[in-house]
Amino acid sequence: MQLFLEIIKITIWPAVVLVSVLILRKGILELILNLKRLKYKELELEFEREAIKLRAEIERDIPLIEPPKEEPSDITLQKPITKLSVAKLAPQEFILNEWYKLEIGISYLLERHGIEQNLLTSIRAKIEKLMHEKIIDNATGSALLELNAYRNKIAHAQEAFINYEMSNAYSESTERLLLYLESL
């Protein structure tokens, strides 16, 4: 009997915690999905804060270029799936796609200035070449490199920690940079 009581005394708290987690799993999962920061031992990820910081730096350092006015077409007159709805539905893929557009813009800029590149040239090397040739300034180059580093973090993060605010801030940053690169 004493052995039985000792076993119960040892296992009661883990059992209570396990049953609580099972009962509250839906609420716990929602809480985890709404986290903007994840910390585990030495690893700390603050995705949203970083995206907003990048956007603020880009707004400070990169001049705002107005996009050209487009004539409405049959396609644009239909109810489109907006960028923001994609950012809400699939924020990780949205960020990766926004970076891809910026990467294409970087390649076009190199091409317009007659700078050779090949498919194996890394994006970092392309940005550094643009800075070396004085086509972009250091602030623009730094912003591009930071957006690329952030994109890489997002590509390897669990999608549960990426939200609409992060993807929207990233999109605003890439749009501003892309319009600026197109103006050079």
Image (spheres, helix red, strand yellow):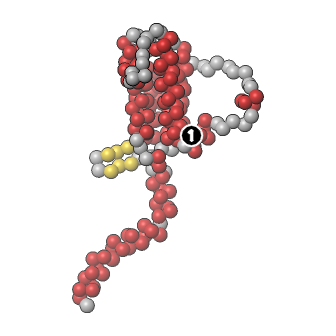
Query: In the drawing, does residue 17 fall left or right of residue 27?
Result: left
Q: Number of marks in the image? A: 1
Name the one closer to the observer, 106 or 18. 106
Indicate the position of residue 117 as horizontal and vertical percent values. Answer: 42, 16
Indicate the position of residue 157 as horizontal and vertical percent values. Answer: 41, 43
* Residue 114 visible within the image: yes
Identify which amino acid the numbered label 1 is placed on. Answer: Ala
Q: Quadrant of residue 156?
A: top left
* Residue 173 visible within the image: no
Residue at the image point whose x is 30% and y is 81% from the top: 8
Indicate the position of residue 167 as horizontal and vertical percent values. Answer: 51, 38
Mark 1 falls on what kind of element?
Answer: helix
Give the residue furthest to the left.
2
**Picture layout, residue 150 above or below residue 8:** above
Query: In the drawing, does residue 122 fall left or right of residue 63?
Result: left
Give the residue furthest to the front.
119
Residue at the image point whose x is 36% and y is 74% from the top: 15
Instruction: State the quadrant of the N terminus.
Output: bottom left
Residue at the image point whose x is 39% and y is 32% from the top: 149
Residue at the image point whose x is 73% and y is 21% from the top: 71
Q: Residues within 10 Å of mark 1 (few under 14, many from 20)?
A: many
**Picture layout, residue 49 above or below residue 183:** below
Indicate the position of residue 144 as horizontal and vertical percent values. Answer: 43, 24
Name the one closer to the observer, 78 or 23. 78
Query: In the drawing, does residue 81 fall left or right of residue 48?
Result: right
User: Residue under circle 1?
Assistant: 87
Name the one closer to the observer, 69 or 130. 130
